[in-house]
């Protein structure tokens, strides 16, 4: 029996990638925040289509990636294109208000 290898996700080199660094779930409050962020990511991907790839980076699963981007406050949004950081937003404006990022993110992404 042959094992199948997973197929990598192919993203064109010029496509920008929005990395969404997610905080770990340590309380009910964090669980609600993660749910809001996941909704935000879905809405954002629908709005920007294939112009930008939106990827979730879970801090508890990928702490080295979070450290490599020197993220100080979670959640964090980092827009990169061809290895160059174009924009960054760390932390939330206010608790439970993650959706306020949507217009700002769409505007920022449409510039690239």
Image (cartoon, rainbow, N blue to C red):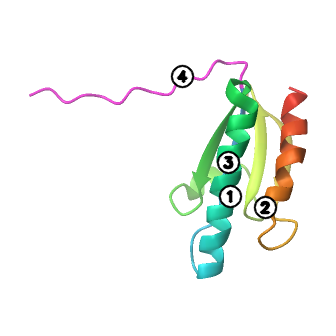
Q: Which secondary structure is most common in the magenta stretch? A: loop
Is tag 1's residue or tag 4's residue first in the polypeptide sequence? 4
The reply to whether discs 2 and 1 touch (Cβ–Cβ < 8 Å) is yes
The residue beneath circle 3 is 41
Q: Which residues are magenta?
A: 1-15
Secondary structure beneath label 1: helix
The percent position of residue 44, horizontal first and vertical second, equals 73, 42
Is tag 3's residue or tag 2's residue first in the polypeptide sequence? 3
The residue beneath circle 2 is 98
Is tag 3's residue or tag 4's residue first in the polypeptide sequence? 4
Secondary structure beneath label 2: helix
The residue beneath circle 1 is 37
Determine whether 1 is above or below 94 in the image: above
The percent position of residue 71, horizontal first and vertical second, equals 75, 57
Is tag 2's residue or tag 1's residue first in the polypeptide sequence? 1
Query: CA–CA distance between discs 3 and 1?
Result: 6 Å
Q: Is residue 10 magenta?
A: yes
Query: CA–CA distance between discs 2 and 1?
Result: 6 Å
Left or right relative to 103: residue 53: left
The reply to whether discs 3 and 1 touch (Cβ–Cβ < 8 Å) is yes
Q: Residue at x 68, y 38 (%)?
A: 45
Q: Residues within 10 Å of mark 4 (few under 14, many from 20)?
A: few
Is tag 4's residue or tag 2's residue first in the polypeptide sequence? 4
Q: Which mark is residue 10?
A: 4
Q: Is residue 55 magenta?
A: no
Determine whether 65 is above or below 87 in the image: below
The percent position of residue 10, horizontal first and vertical second, equals 54, 22
Query: CA–CA distance between discs 1 and 4?
Result: 24 Å
Q: Residues within 10 Å of mark 3 (few under 14, many from 20)?
A: many
């Amino acid at each position: 029996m042959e094992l199948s290898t997973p197929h990598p996700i192919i993203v064109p080199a010029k496509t920008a990638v929005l990395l969404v660094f997610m905080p770990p779930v340590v309380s009910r409050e964090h669980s609600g925040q993660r749910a809001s962020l996941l909704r935000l990511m879905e809405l954002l991907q629908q709005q920007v289509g294939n112009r930008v790839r939106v990827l979730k980076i879970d801090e508890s699963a990928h702490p080295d990636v979070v450290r490599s981007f020197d993220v100080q406050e979670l959640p964090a949004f980092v827009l990169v294109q061809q290895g160059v950081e174009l924009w960054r937003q760390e932390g939330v404006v206010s608790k439970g208000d993650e959706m306020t990022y949507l217009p700002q993110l769409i505007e920022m992404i449409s510039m690239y």
